[in-house]
């Protein structure tokens, strides 16, 4: 197996790093403190072709793999996670539309995401349904040529700024099989009855919008249903297989940032008349971080390569997700430790890294849920 990047992939990675270094550092602290973001940066990323590279050429994308999207994601997250996510998650849901949308839906809803004209998101989580997605009780009930949607969605990325969301709803609440009750719907956010309330006070990725969504008798045409009724859970699992790969890239990116900050700091700061880098305790931390990052990257590279080769291995994706999440949090913790008291202050980037890293162990399947998937694949 050869994971050497092609010339094109190396160029994408390099260009993504250059873009992030040019755009993110100057404003990262401001956006983190104020929980805001400048969408012109996302528009610029669209213009330069960093957004939605996995979207088929027929719908305006570059027609590249999920792997190339991972490469961009890792580079962006290695510079600033919050701003990276504000750009990268603007297509969160395009993967689902690409896999399960009709030709008409793809032609209408995908090109604006690449052209910097629309932002999307995917709304699954509810106040009483997080890890247990089949417990989602938002309903979409058929009424002639329309569906009427009612419910509440929690923690929805881009909820307050998206032009449309892919909303996971029950179409058949009484079906005895919990896995056959749901379907996805495209919901334009300007429809009557749709309301988004921005959530404040997040621990990290504060530049990225998160909102609570209320849907009160929101009517959508039946043509907005993505896939068949009862197919929602299956579609969601296929979607997560891909988007969890993207989370692995986020995790490896932020772990790299933690390593880079640590190396710079311990070479510069002196104690006991010597640089911190001369103490073996710190050297071991650096060695362990670098090894873990390499291992996590190899895991997700293999999982993404299999996915793009049409040989999706969902247990491997789950392994890569929990492992990369755990190493991201661990590396961020060690990085802050090596900064001592300075790491505790938000003037130092490492504090933000420490706060931003935690999310990769939570969203799109907590690390415990990923381990449940791995264990099930082994135990049956
Ligand atoms: C910043 C942010 C952005 C998000 N973006 C989105 C989004 O765009 N769209 C969306 O739909 N959701 C989004 N989420 C929601 C996220 O996916 C959920 O928070 C996550 O899936 C966990 O669900 P929960 O918070 O309800 O936790 P719970 O399900 O209540 O879990 C709490 C704890 O119990 C553990 N647990 C639960 N069940 C089991 C089990 N069977 N075995 C072992 N342990 C278990 C979990 O691992 C966790 O540690 C976002 C969340 C955040 C914080």
Image (cartoon, helix red, strand yellow):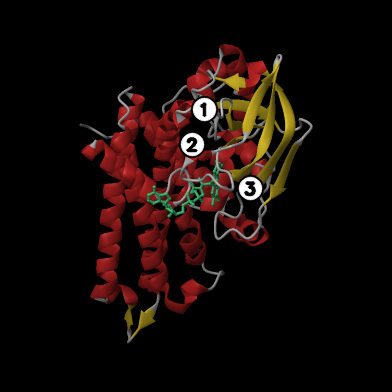
Residue 369 location (% of width, % of height): 38, 46
Q: Does 122 appear above or below 82?
A: above
Residue 134's disc is: 2
Residue 208 visible in the current orientation? yes
Q: Quadrant of residue 340?
A: bottom left
Residue in the picture at 22% in, 32% down:
2
Q: Toward the viewer: 186 or 69?
A: 186
Q: Toward the viewer: 368 or 114?
A: 368
Residue in the picture at 74% in, 31% down:
217
Q: Toward the viewer: 138 or 203?
A: 138
Q: Is mark 2 within 8 Å of ligand 1?
A: no
Of labels 3 and 2, earlier in sequence is 2
Residue 192 location (% of width, % of height): 79, 32
Residue 209's disc is: 3
Which label sits in the foreground, 1 or 3? 1
- Badge 2 vs badge 1, beta-carbon distance below 8 Å: yes
């Amino acid at each position: 197996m050869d994971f050497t990047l092609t010339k094109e992939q190396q160029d994408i990675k390099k260009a993504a790093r250059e873009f992030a270094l040019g755009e993110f550092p100057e404003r990262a602290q401001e956006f983190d403190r104020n929980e805001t973001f400048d969408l012109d940066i996302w528009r610029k990323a669209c213009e330069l072709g960093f957004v939605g590279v996995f979207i088929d050429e027929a719908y305006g994308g570059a027609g590249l793999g999920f792997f190339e999207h991972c490469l961009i994601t890792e580079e962006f997250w290695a510079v600033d996670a919050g701003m990276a996510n504000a750009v990268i998650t603007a297509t969160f849901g395009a993967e689902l539309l690409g896999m399960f949308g009709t030709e008409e839906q793809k032609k209408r809803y995908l090109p604006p995401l690449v052209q910097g004209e629309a932002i999307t998101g995917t709304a699954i989580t509810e106040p009483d349904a997080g890890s247990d997605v089949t417990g989602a009780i938002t309903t979409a009930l058929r009424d002639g040529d329309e569906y009427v949607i009612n419910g509440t969605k929690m923690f929805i990325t881009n909820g307050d700024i998206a032009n449309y969301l892919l909303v996971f709803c029950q179409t058949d609440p009484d079906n005895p099989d919990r896995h056959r009750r749901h379907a996805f719907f495209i919901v334009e956010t300007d429809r009557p009855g749709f309301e988004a309330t921005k959530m404040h006070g997040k621990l990290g990725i504060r530049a990225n919008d998160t909102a609570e969504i209320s849907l009160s008798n929101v009517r959508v045409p039946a043509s907005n249903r993505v896939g068949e009724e009862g197919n929602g859970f299956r579609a969601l699992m296929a979607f997560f297989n891909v988007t969890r790969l993207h989370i692995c890239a986020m995790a490896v990116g932020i772990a790299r940032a933690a390593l880079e900050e640590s190396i710079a700091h311990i070479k510069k700061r002196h104690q006991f008349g010597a640089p911190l880098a001369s103490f073996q305790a710190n050297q071991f931390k650096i060695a362990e971080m670098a090894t873990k990052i390499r291992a996590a990257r190899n895991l997700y590279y293999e999982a993404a390569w299999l996915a793009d080769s049409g040989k999706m291995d969902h247990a491997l994706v789950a392994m890569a997700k929990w492992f990369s999440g755990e190493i991201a949090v661990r590396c961020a913790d060690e990085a802050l430790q090596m900064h001592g008291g300075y790491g505790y202050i938000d003037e130092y980037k490492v504090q933000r890294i420490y706060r931003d890293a935690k999310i990769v162990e939570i969203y799109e399947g907590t690390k415990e849920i990923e381990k449940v998937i791995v264990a099930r694949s082994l135990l049956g």
